[in-house]
Amino acid sequence: MKVATWNVNSIRQREGHVQRWLEACQPDVLFLQEIKCEATSFPSLTYHGFGYTSEVVGQKSYNGVAALCRHPFTVTHTALPGLPDGDVQARYVEIETQDVTLIGIYAPNGNSRGDEGFAYKLAWMDCLAARAAELLKAETPFLITGDYNICPTDEDYAPGALPPTDALVRLESRQRWRRMLWLGLTDAVRALHPHGAHYTFWDYQGGAWQRDMGLRIDHALLSPEMAERLVAAEPDKQERDRPQPSDHVPVMFTFQ
DNA sequence: ATGCCGGGTCCTACCCGA
């Protein structure tokens, strides 16, 4: 089974990129983030033609996530359990297929709106940890993949690519990441590649791609059963070199 | 310690992302 994640920075701008990549790489499931549109504007029919059906958790202008799957699946959640009523940000989709639970996330950045924005990021990650704990307790095989907006360690961003005060590298953000590991989850890329950059994002500005000033912020965390099945975990850097790319590249995770 | 780039929308100047 192959599961992929990709923050596309507007699906309407990246419809063709996603189509070509699906045809070339044939994941069983692809989670998308920052689709930046409502479900009615999502180009579902394009992907139906390639054997994928979709679940779209849309929002006008901002955020928005989706799951594309080429097997029958059921949707178990379209919002992160535990968030306050009235939170309308489209950041979570959870499905079941092939006897596993697959979760796609777009975690808050945490740099906007000052202390309130950062507090929202931390609260969101607290809810995600609670959901993970619940699934672990039920012994459900699962993974949580997507844009975590966290560089787990200093090895996960190019020196100087971010100030030390950035929400992506702040102590509190990294504490939230480490709590997921302490629960018993496995960082898929680091399980197979303990060292090295393996960046998944390069800013559009300042020649970040050409200078390799990247970040590793798109991840998959695996339950123990899924970790034992893991055989590959790779960002597809080639996508960043194409015309009109997303600032993130897809990351593919392969399981036996 | 940023918003130079590139999305979005109240269509055009401004908001947002990492």
Image (cartoon, helix red, strand yellow):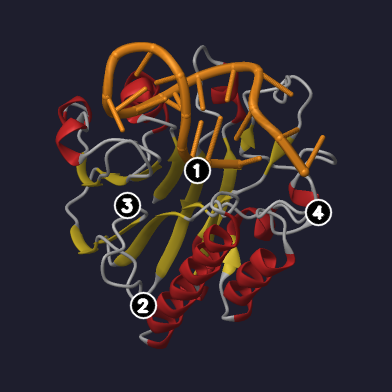
Q: Secondary structure at mark 3?
A: loop
In the drawing, what numbered circle is on residue A51? none
Q: Amino acid at mark 3?
A: Ala
Instruction: Mark 1 or mark 3: name the one nearer the start of the chain.
Output: 3
Task: Give the residue at mark 2.
Answer: A140
Instruction: Mark 3 or mark 2: name the one nearer the start of the chain.
Output: 3
Above or below, A208 against A74 in this view is above
Task: Give the residue at mark 1.
Answer: A252
How many neighbours does mark 4 have within 10 angstroms: few (below 14), some (14-19), or many (20 or more)? few
Q: Is mark 4 in CB contact (under 8 Å) with mark 1?
A: no
Q: CA distance from mark 1 to mark 3?
A: 23 Å
Q: Chain of mark 1?
A: A
Instruction: Mark 3 or mark 4: name the one nearer the start of the chain.
Output: 3
Q: Are marks 3 and 2 on the same chain?
A: yes
Q: CA distance from mark 4 to mark 1?
A: 23 Å
Q: Chain of mark 2?
A: A
Q: Are marks 1 and 3 on the same chain?
A: yes
Q: Nearer the viewer, mark 3 or mark 2?
A: 3
Q: Nearer the viewer, mark 2 or mark 4?
A: 4
